[in-house]
Amino acid sequence: MQEEKASLSIKDWADDDKPREKLVQKGRSVLSDAELIAILIGSGSKNESAVELSKRILASVGNNLNDLGRLSVKQLMQFKGIGEAKAVTIAAALEIGRRRRREAGQQITKIASSGDAFELLQPLIGELEHEEFWILYLNNSNKVVHKGQLSKGGITGTLVDVRLVMKQALELGAVALILAHNHPSGTLVPSKADKTITQKLKSAAQALDIKVLDHLIIAQKAYLSFADEQLL
């Protein structure tokens, strides 16, 4: 009976199912997401290896690591074979990954494309469950002189104070702006309100000889650029 309760540790797995050895011998990039998570949790159960358990967990979130990172410790513990210690390990590892990406984005100081703006802003708002509106203020070299949250709202939308944007732009000596907000739903289709506020900000900025270079709608893994789509 004791044997039936034993869990399968990595050292007991078949040679072709040992992600730790695979990582050491071939490098971390060759491991699947499930294998990397299996290393974190260390063991499965009598009837399920850590890799199989990891695949089951990933399948529940559509094999999306961003969605996995949004699960709470309590939610992770709903999976059979995942206790508090394993759940905490998974949550901590994914949080480290999120912070690493945020730090990488913070190193971007000059915006040369919509992709640069996305890399800078996605770690800040891409995974939020509520909507936020942010502004990047740029100088004449397209370097970011300031980035900040303008407003925070519910999933249905957020309010934007046009006068506050212009006031801050003048105080910072900015000559260009990049607008951005997230869509928690994941949709990248601009709403009528998105288009309206873009035009309001563009018109107000033009009166002050300030350019609105772009407006990004940001989701977890992708974005829509008004400039790239010729919507400005």
Image (cartoon, rainbow, N blue to C red):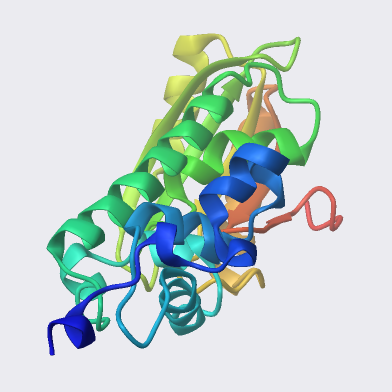
Whether residue 214 can be seen here: no
How far from the left and from the top, in percent, is residue 26? 72, 42
For the residue pair 190 and 208, the one nearer the viewer reads as 190
Residue 19 in the image, given as x and y percentages of width and height? 55, 55
Query: How many numbered discs, if any?
Result: 0
As drawn, 141 above or below 138: above
The residue lying toward the viewer, choosing from 146 and 23, is: 23
Q: Is residue 177 visible?
A: yes
Q: Nearer the viewer, residue 115 or 35?
A: 35
Is residue 54 shown above or below 229?
below
Instruction: Residue 60: name its quadrant.
Output: bottom left
Which residue is drawn at the image coordinates 49% and 53% (left, top)? 126
Q: Which of the 4 quarters of the picture holds residue 107? A: top right
Horizontal relation, residue 120 to residue 56: left or right: right
Image coordinates for residue 116, horizontal then vertical, percent: 71, 33
Q: Residue at x 71, y 51 (%)?
A: 30
Please name the residue shown 51% across and 15% down the image. Answer: 170
Image spot of residue 131 (x, y percent): 39, 59
Above or below residue 180? Residue 8 is: below
Q: Quadrant of residue 141?
A: top right
Which quadrant, please, contains the N terminus?
bottom left
Q: Residue at x 63, y 23 (%)?
A: 208
Q: In the picture provided, is 196 more to the left or to the right than 172?
A: right
